[in-house]
Image (cartoon, grey):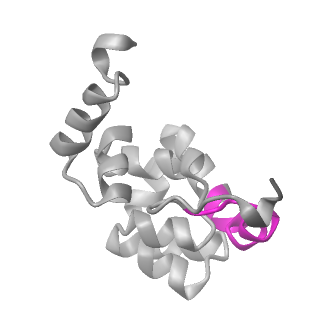
């Protein structure tokens, strides 16, 4: 099966070379959230922190609006965006719900129904 024949999965965004390039500054910024210093600098002046990493206007707007889905579309890697989501008090299941259009509780119930919930590690 060639890559062009692969099935598209609703709610997912292909993270390939061009997307990695597009999201470089965004992902670099989110990586800094691993440190308390990075998190505090962001919280002190979010817009200026975005500017420090050269975010595009669309990326900056999505950060300021807390729009995780737009950030995925703008080249954000879910692995780095998880750091941003943590600042917002969101966990992986919250983001999964956002990606699928479900509430967090609906997403957790779906995972449990698929054998991927807390009971199956």
Quarter of image, res 114: top left
From this view, report whether residue 11 is shown above or below residue 31.
below
Question: What residue do we see at 53% from left, 46% from top?
Answer: 33
Reply yes or no: does residue 18 show up in magenta: yes
Q: Pick out the residue farthest to the bottom.
A: 57
Majority secondary structure of magenta residues: helix
Residues rendered magenta in the picture = 13-27
Question: What residue do we see at 32% from left, 40% from top?
Answer: 93
Question: What residue do we see at 80% from left, 53% from top?
Answer: 1
Left or right: 85 in relation to 109:
right
Residue 46 position in % (x across, y down): 43, 68
Residue 32 position in % (x across, y down): 60, 48
Reply yes or no: does residue 103 show up in magenta: no
Left or right: 64 in relation to 34:
left
Residue 71 position in % (x across, y down): 50, 68
Quarter of image, res 115: top left
Residue 49 visible in the picture = no
Residue 113 position in % (x across, y down): 26, 28
């Amino acid at each position: 099966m060639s890559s062009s024949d692969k099935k598209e999965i609703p709610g997912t965004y292909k993270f390939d070379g061009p997307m990695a390039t597009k999201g470089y500054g965004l992902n670099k910024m989110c990586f800094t959230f691993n440190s308390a210093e990075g998190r505090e600098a962001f919280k002190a002046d979010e817009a200026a922190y975005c500017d420090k990493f050269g975010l595009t206007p669309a990326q900056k707007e999505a950060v300021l609006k807390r729009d995780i889905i737009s950030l995925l579309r703008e080249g954000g890697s879910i692995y780095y965006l998880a750091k941003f989501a943590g600042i917002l008090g969101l966990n992986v299941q919250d983001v999964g719900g956002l990606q699928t259009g479900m509430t967090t509780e609906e997403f957790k119930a779906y995972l449990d129904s698929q054998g991927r919930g807390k009971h199956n590690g």
